[in-house]
Amino acid sequence: MEEILRDFKPFIKKKGLKYTQEREQILKEIVSIKGHFDVEDLYLRFKEKNSKISKASIYRTLPLLVEGGYIQEVYRQDGHSHYEVTLTKTPHLHFICIHCREVQEITDERLNVLIKEYEEEREYKLLTYHLEIFGLCKACKGLKL
Amino acid sequence: MEEILRDFKPFIKKKGLKYTQEREQILKEIVSIKGHFDVEDLYLRFKEKNSKISKASIYRTLPLLVEGGYIQEVYRQDGHSHYEVTLTKTPHLHFICIHCREVQEITDERLNVLIKEYEEEREYKLLTYHLEIFGLCKACKGLKL
DNA sequence: ATTAAAACTGAAAATCAATTTCAATTAGGA
DNA sequence: TCCTAATTGAAATTGATTTTCAGTTTTAAT
Ligand SMILES: [Mn+2]
Ligand SMILES: [Mn+2]
Ligand SMILES: [Zn+2]
Ligand SMILES: [Zn+2]
């Protein structure tokens, strides 16, 4: 996590942007989150600690962090984006129950291998990917819908 | 495509819904589309042929068609959903260039095998999935961004 | 350390996809 | 044909995200 912060300033400067308190605070807060988060989650965390970071700044910073590879948009639920820290975490996919909204993470190195393979074949530069599987979880599939 | 329409009425009736002109027109129009489409595309197609199908009806019908397996939401771009007819098409993934917005389709049976495997392991009921790979396409990766 | 220009910020307004409301219309069983 | 519930189109609303803009901060050059 220290590693991430050390890397962030050069990343920002290299893009000709300013290294602001807000950008630093947002990244620091994010790396302290274990699990998924959305803009509202982040905003409330700042509010609780009386930090007056605005949603506008959050919305402006998240794409930068995605671009830098610090976080990833991992799925979309209830009409908004959810993110998580990329960190040392292996890329993984999400199973989302359309009934109870549970989100399960599935990690499978074989998937990453396939994705890499496509990258070479198509000669594109891979930045990130999302695999979202929708269905009914074990608990919900028995219920009559 | 005739097959799809033959199947649609029973599907609608089985759900206790009414088989309306609008629902039929929407499905007919959709099966005539080759490639991806979004709500605006569909709406404009109806407008051109002086059909007064509203966006509200389109928005109300698409989830039904997804549920029935006639179409799939395949990716999200520019803040809105894009669909395509499921038809006999093999499930596939999409590579999206974040610069020029090009969308490439990639079909790989090995991916489907993995997805099925997860379904059995986790004991959920698979309904659909999206795999979106973001990056820079061959043409764009050389440009200085 | 001062200064100045450009980038950035918070708050509010704007945008825009998607959903909801509601009065009028339609489907389809009795 | 009649009746009622479901559906529709248009308009209003919602809610996430983006944009605007006046005031603030960063940063490089004095
Ligand atoms: Mn995850
Ligand atoms: Mn496709
Ligand atoms: Zn569930
Ligand atoms: Zn491109």
Image: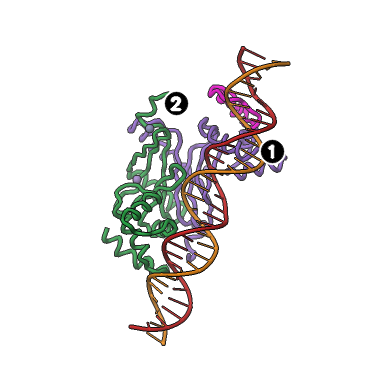
Chain colours: A green, B purple, C red, D orange
Q: Which quadrant, please, contains the N terminus of chain B?
A: top right
Q: Chain of mark 1?
A: B
Q: Chain of mark 2?
A: A
Confirm whether the magenta stretch covers residue B12: yes
Mark 2 C-beta closer than 8 Å to ligand 3: no
Q: Amino acid at mark 1?
A: Lys
Where does residue B116 sit, x and y in percent of width and height? 39, 34
Q: Secondary structure at mark 1?
A: loop
Which quadrant would residue A52 be assigned to in this image? bottom left
For the magenta stretch, what is the residue range? B1-24
* Residue under the image location 37 percent in, 65 percent down: A11
* Residue under the image location 70 percent in, 38 percent down: B51
Res B88 visible: no
Res B101 visible: yes
**Residue matched to label 1:** B52
**Residue matched to label 2:** A145
Judging depth in this view, the residue of B47 and C3 nearest the camera is: C3
Confirm whether the magenta stretch covers residue A51: no
B61 to the left or right of B50: left
Judging depth in this view, the residue of B72 and B44 nearest the camera is: B44
Marks 2 and 1 sit apart, C-alpha to C-alpha, by: 33 Å
Which quadrant would residue C10 be assigned to in this image? bottom left
Query: Looking at the picture, do discs 2 and 1 lie on one chain?
Result: no
Where does residue B30 sit, x and y in percent of width and height? 61, 37
